[in-house]
Image: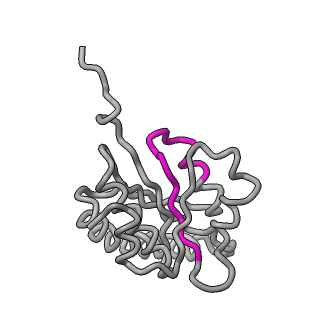
Amino acid sequence: MNAVTPDDRQRKYAVVVDDTPECRKALRYAAGRAASTPGGQVLILHVIPPMDFVQWGGVQDMMEQEAREKAEALLEAMAVDVERQAGRPPQILIRAGKTDEQVLNVLRADPSVVRLVLAASAKGDPGPLVDFFSGQIAGTLPCPVTIVPGGMTPESLDALADFG
């Protein structure tokens, strides 16, 4: 019988992605951590926000399909960079709904997620996900949260993540 050793376990770094510049910083950090972690992998999650109700179902279906296609294109482009940096392809998930709820569902459903990696905006408000996951819910999360400062340079991210 083959026993699973700690080095055989998969360890995922979950990153919520959108089209903001700071999410790319979170991805870079997560890819570096995954590259230097035995069993490390990046989980890329994109959440499509709920659509406003459209009276004609066909129009709403088309809008939802367009949103999904846009999300898939965004994730495919990011996956190439993550694979190059982490040395293995990321897991890609697309969910629909409220972002904070969907992220929380993914974290609670997948015990191999060892960290949620978010990036704060370089200026002003850090962002709604940083506020949510570092606020009152922080003590009930199934994994730690890392908040990457949006103003960090790629070089400083690489050094911090033990990558490069």
Q: Residue furthest top?
A: 1
Q: Is residue 69 left or right of residue 101?
A: left
Please report the residue visible at 31 percent of the width from the left and 26 percent of the height from the top: 4
Q: Position of residue 128 (x, y in %)?
A: 67, 70
Is 89 positioned to the left or the right of 150 in the image?
Answer: left
Residue 115: image x %, image y %? 50, 51
Q: Residue at x 72, y 52 (%)?
A: 137
In which quadrant of the rendered view does residue 123 lie? bottom right
In the image, 121 versus 129, the foreground residue is 121
Image x and y of residue 53, in percent? 69, 72
Please identify the residue farthest to the bottom as the structure is shown: 123
Q: Give residue 30's quadrant in the image.
A: bottom left
The image's colouring method is: one colour
Instruction: Quarter of the image for the N terminus: give it.
Output: top left
Magenta residues (range): 104-120
Asked if the stretch drawn in magenta spans residue 44, the answer is no
Q: Residue at (69%, 62%) from the top-left corner? A: 132
Q: Position of residue 58 (x, y in %)?
A: 55, 72
Of all residues, the one furthest to the right in this rendering is 136
Left or right of residue 34, residue 148 in this image:
right
Task: Give the total number of marks visible in the rendering.
Answer: 0
Within the magenta stretch, is there residue 113? yes
Placement of 96 over or under 41, stated as above or below: below
- Looking at the rendering, in which quadrant would you find the C terminus? bottom left
Closer to us: 134 or 76 = 134
Residue at 42%, 61% in the rendered image: 44
For residue 31, above or below residue 62: above
